[in-house]
Image (spheres, rainbow, N blue to C red):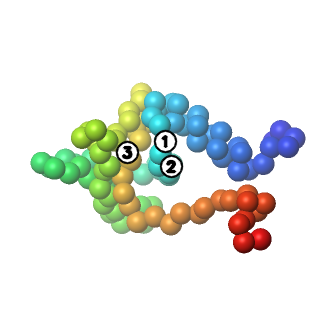
């Protein structure tokens, strides 16, 4: 790790590289799942992502649309699907910015 560089900055730079790789703006969180089986199914108004956990449990998520199109970004080796799933978010703040002290 370069001197003066912390894990938060490294994470942010990695996120920017991923967004650049997929050619998207990145207004969402990224969850790498390269070894999971997955499928996309579309019906008239909605698109759904299904993926299977390591224990074989099927999880369904609604794919987000932007400009009326499902947010699915494909490259030669990977596909990124932006979907709404039950998620816990870890917010990371700089301590010196705490308004209460």
- The secondary structure type at the circle numbered 1 is loop
Cα distance between the residues tagged 2 and 3? 10 Å
N-terminal-most mark, 3 or 1: 1
Q: Residue furthest top?
A: 76
Q: Which part of the image, by quadrant, shows the N terminus?
A: top right
Q: Nearer the viewer, mark 3 or mark 1?
A: 1
Q: Tell which of 21 and 68 is nearer to you.
A: 68
Q: Which residue is mark 3?
A: 81
Image location (x, y in percent) of residue 101: 77, 71
Q: Nearer the viewer, mark 1 or mark 2?
A: 1
Marks 1 and 2 in Cβ contact (< 8 Å)? yes
Q: Which residue is mark 2?
A: 30
Could you say which disc has been placed on residue 26 in the image? Answer: 1
Residue depicted at 16% across the width and 50% down the height: 45
Cα distance between the residues tagged 1 and 2? 8 Å
Left or right: residue 28 versus residue 56 is right
Q: Residues within 10 Å of mark 1 (few under 14, many from 20)?
A: some
Cα distance between the residues tagged 3 and 1? 12 Å
Residue 54 visible to an observer of this rendering: yes
Residue depicted at 53% across the width and 31% down the height: 20
Q: Quadrant of residue 96?
A: bottom right
Q: Tell which of 22 and 54 is nearer to you.
A: 22
Image location (x, y in percent) of residue 44: 12, 48
Left or right: residue 75 versus residue 47 is right
Image location (x, y in percent) of residue 83: 36, 52
Residue depicted at 63% across the width and 40% down the height: 14
- The secondary structure type at the circle numbered 2 is loop
């Amino acid at each position: 790790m370069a001197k003066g560089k912390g894990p938060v900055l490294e994470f942010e730079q990695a996120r920017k590289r991923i967004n650049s790789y997929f050619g998207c703006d990145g207004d969402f969180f990224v969850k790498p799942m390269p070894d999971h089986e997955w499928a996309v199914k579309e019906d008239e108004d909605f698109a759904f992502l299904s993926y299977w956990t390591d224990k074989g449990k099927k999880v369904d998520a609604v794919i987000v649309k932007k400009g009326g199109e499902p947010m699915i970004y494909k490259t030669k080796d990977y596909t990124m699907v932006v979907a709404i799933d039950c998620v816990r978010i870890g917010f990371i703040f700089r301590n010196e910015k705490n308004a209460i002290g």
